[in-house]
Image: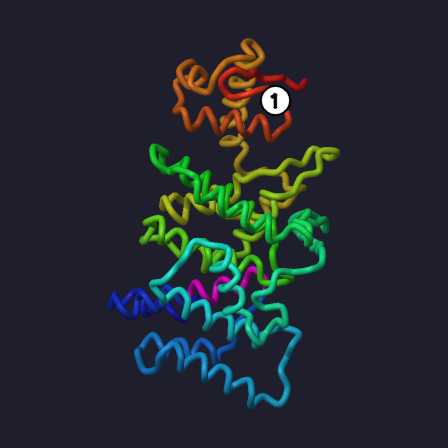
Amino acid sequence: MENFEEYLRQGEPNKAEKAKVWKTAIGLQQVDGLKPSEYLIDTAKQNIEGYITIDEVKLRIDSYYEQQAVINNENRTEEADKVSARIAEILSENTFAFSPAEYISIHRRLFQGIYSHAGKIRDYNITKKEWVLNGETVIYASAASLKATLEYDFEQEKKFKYKGLSQQEIVEHIAHFVSYLWQIHVFGEGNTRTTALFLIKYLRKLGFNEVNNNIFAEHSRYFRNALVRANYEDLSKGIYKTEKYLIRFLSNLLLKENHTLNNREQHIHYIDTINDTVKSKIDTVNDTVFNLIKQNNRITATEISDTLKISLSTSKRRIKALKEQGKIERVGSDKKGYWRVIE
């Protein structure tokens, strides 16, 4: 990524904007452990300098690999180069439609000529061993229900009203939406890069025009692991789905917060020995909230907020954490229900 820092430091708006786009495009290849070639880097610089257009970049990359006697499929450099150029092209376009068709179209544009299934909904079930899950897999949507599930998630998001939400609540909702979208895993390969690119375009549509795409460029692997952790649970081992890592990523991306994004911390067997003090404080608040619920199983998030002198959003996050830890569960509706304490 240091290849493009000179353009960001120079401050020329057009060059800096192109450099940001290329950093994101190349950084996203890391979600699948791919690394673009030096040829791609040099060609991207010519585009940033204004010597060639993005269409000419794509043509040069295509020509470059047509002339190669042997293509190293082991490290998938050709895929990384071509997909990087295509991501840069899409990010440079001021067009977007929030629809399943757009989502599928992005996959087709990214992987045309690379995957035989580019832009096609998979017709087989899949599993993927994940390092962060110690070799286990997320349970992805069934091939038989992919189209219906994708359409349902889009419809639910279209109906959702952001009005009245705090910035933190907006981030938490977006985390929920994108984790559900990714879990469907519509395609055989390329789901994370497609989802990330779609998310960036959607965030722009929502008005987040100053999105810090450096987060995607530098922490795309963290983004994928966060999606994995948001969709995996093994209750027999005390492992619960959690969106906290995804929320940290999006908070840095959208709210310019400065959470540490550590891949090791996301591993299901990770033991935090660094942030014990901070963790202790959070656990203390969680325990206090838990005690209040044990004392009054009909207490509301607002009442907890008032009692502990914490914000309503913090109160809701602590309740959510207790639910994810399996300590409480909601019985009945939000208005007339109650909390069941699980000892």
Residue at the spot of label 1: 328
Farthest right residue? 236
Nearest the eye: 328 or 219: 328
Looking at the image, is 272 positioned above or below residue 40? above
- Residue 232: x and y in percent read 65, 43
| Residue at left offset 41%, top offset 46% | 252
Compared across the picture, whether 268 is left or right of 155 comes to right
Q: Categorize mark 1 by other alpha carbons within 10 Å: few (<14), some (14-19), many (20+).
A: many
Looking at the image, is 117 positioned above or below residue 203? below
Looking at the image, is 207 positioned above or below residue 287? below
The amino acid type found where label 1 is placed reads Ile
- Residue 201: x and y in percent read 40, 57
Q: Is residue 24 magenta?
A: yes
- Image quadrant in which you'd find residue 158: top left
Q: Is residue 303 magenta?
A: no
| Residue at left offset 67%, top offset 48% | 138
